[in-house]
Amino acid sequence: MNGLLGIFWSAFEPRETVEQRSMGLLRAHLNAMQRRQFDEHGWFDVVGGQSGRQYRVHRAYVTNVQEVGADGACVQVLCFSPRGHLPLGDVLLAQKVALEVFERDAVAVACRWPASAARYTSLQSMLRAANRG
Amino acid sequence: MRVQIVLDHTGSTRHEFDPALATAEVRFRELSITGCRAVARGSNEDAGKIVSEFGQKTDRCCSFLSSQQGE
């Protein structure tokens, strides 16, 4: 009887949301430095697997990937994403893996914007950070 | 633990396949047909590599639909 009641009441317990699950998976695939960057700034850096270029992946769905120079300044903004309707953590993970493993293919399909578009990405990140707080 | 992770609308679906390699292979082929790319990753922090065939050596595999141009 207690077992049945336990199952019944467990249906009302708070569960991990889709977004939380996807963020958990993303974090499991970030290294320590990337996790720290993501927690502190809302972005993490990825090194392109084929060119060695540095990319900054921001916590947003669109226009959220920046190619950055050695000084950390944005060179250009890239917009690409995995097909399908995925939660944010999955989108960021897919972008990270794509840049690390098949960078040329990912960059080839990406929509590119001048560095000035980075202000839009930064604004998105700030808004998200404000919403989290 | 050998695991196949599929990124999907639920966040992700994990399939542990130690005793069920054949099932995992079938799932891998089905996902490949739909356009999914699979990347095998080791336990360390290496970038991983694209998997074109699923087999005994695959430990940790992450599948998702290939990239498209953003909006």
Image (spheres, coloured by chain):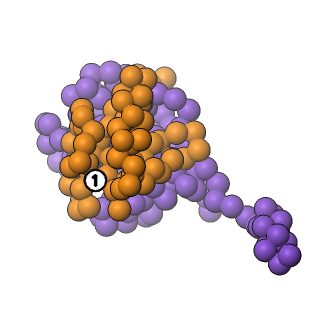
Tell me what residue is drawn at x 61 percent, y 50 percent.
Answer: A18
Disc 1 on helix, strand or loop? loop
- Give whichever of B25, B68 is nearer the camera: B25
- Locate residue B65: give its quadrant: top left
Tell me what residue is drawn at x 36 percent, y 41 percent.
Answer: B22
Residue B33 appears anywhere in the view: yes
Q: Colour of chain A?
A: purple
**Is residue B9 positioned above or below A14 on the image?**
above
Percent position of residue A2, x then y: 83, 78
- The orange-tinted chain is B
- Locate residue A5: give its quadrant: bottom right
Name the subunit of mark 1. Answer: B
The quadrant of the picture occupied by the N terminus of chain B is: bottom left
Tell me what residue is drawn at x 39 percent, y 22 percent.
Answer: B33
- Give whichever of A16, A47 is nearer the camera: A16
Percent position of residue A115, x then y: 33, 32
Number of residue marks:
1
- Locate residue A82: give its quadrant: top left
Label 1, on which residue? B59
